[in-house]
Structures are given as structure tokens and as C-alpha cells.
Image (cartoon, rainbow, N blue to C red):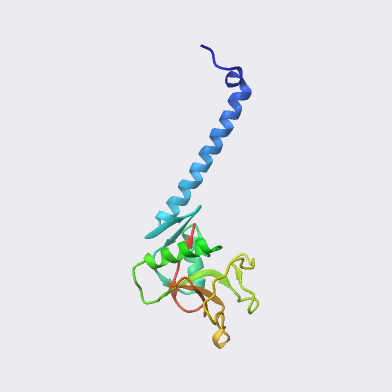
Amino acid sequence: MQGSAATNSPLGDASLVKALQSEVKTLKDSLSKLEKAASFQFFRKSGSKYYASNNREAPFSEGKEMCAAGGGTMALPRSEAENQDFTQFFTSLPPVSTQYAYMAATDEKTEGHWVDLEDKPLGFIKWASSEPQNYGGVEHCVVIRKSGLWADVSCSHKFIVICEI
């Protein structure tokens, strides 16, 4: 029995090779993400990304560096579903001295204009009642509470760092 002309032709082989190369690239990318996430003590898949943490507290600037060193960025929920996943991951971490985790958002450049780390305006927010308040004129970073609600805080305080990969 002979195969069809399309599968035996060079053109058919080329499209099959291209499809397989695409599949291999997708698998390599997925494996790379998983390997980066597994370099952290705690991690959980959320959609197409991972939340990861070593459950360490650090100031905002150090947290950004910790995430970059692990192959990711500081995490920022961009929808209600992501906020719920982020909150579940955060509340699953072993207790530490703080009840807050940093998120990748700031108004350091322009007061009241909250942006992500790429300077893009936030498309999703979940401020707690009376937040943001910029208490003392020094609250320019965002944390999430274990309730899933957000607050603005001083970037120099040490809070849990959660990365996304």
C-alpha cells in the first residue's frame, strides 16, 4: 500500500517538519518556564505563567532584582481571576512576619498614576477601601493583602516577593 502523494512529496515533508519544529519550540519554552519556576522554593502554575517565591521579604527594588535573577519579573495580577490565583498562592506560603506581598506596580514617577514595571497603566486594580492614600507622601508601591485587596506602601519596607515566570 502506498501513501498519499502529499505525504510523500517534499512539500508534504517540509510542512510536517515545520509543524514538528513548532511543537518542539513550544515544549522547550514550557520546559524553560517550569525549570525557572522550580528554582524557587514555592511555585504554582496560573494560566500560562507561574507564580514563584522563596518566601523572602525585601524592599521593592531588591524584590525586582530577585525576580530578574530567577528568570522572571515581579508579579502583577491583570484580571480578577489572576488576582484570585495570586492571592491563593500568597496565602499558601508559610507564615512570615508580614501579611503583605509586593506587586509590580508603582506611582514613583507621577503621583497617582499607577503603572506596571514597563510604564504601562494598570488595566486591572483592586484597591482596598480608602486606598491608595499615599500616607505621608511616601507610598509609591503596591502590595496585596491576604484578603486579595491592594494597598499602597513605602517601597523601602520589606514585604514578601512573588515573581511571575
User: In the rendering, at what x and y percent does residue 48 appear?
Assistant: 51, 52
Residue at 55% in and 62% down: 79
User: In the rendering, at what x and y percent does residue 28 appear?
Assistant: 49, 43
Q: Name the residue nearer the viewer: 101 or 1.
A: 1
Q: Name the residue nearer the viewer: 131 or 104.
A: 131
6, above or below 64, in the image: above
* Residue at the limit of the structure toward the left, as seen here: 94
| Count of marks placed on residues | 0
160, above or below 43, in the image: below
Q: Name the residue nearer the viewer: 121 or 79.
A: 79
Residue at 50% in and 59% down: 72
User: In the rendering, at what x and y percent does residue 114 appear?
Assistant: 61, 73
Is residue 140 in view?
Answer: yes
Say whether residue 74 is left or right of residue 92. Answer: right
Residue at 52% in and 77% down: 128
* Residue at the limit of the structure toward the top, as seen here: 1
What is the quadrant of residue 10 in the picture?
Answer: top right
Is residue 74 in view?
Answer: no
Residue at 54% in and 82% down: 130
User: In the rendering, at what x and y percent does residue 121 appear?
Assistant: 64, 68
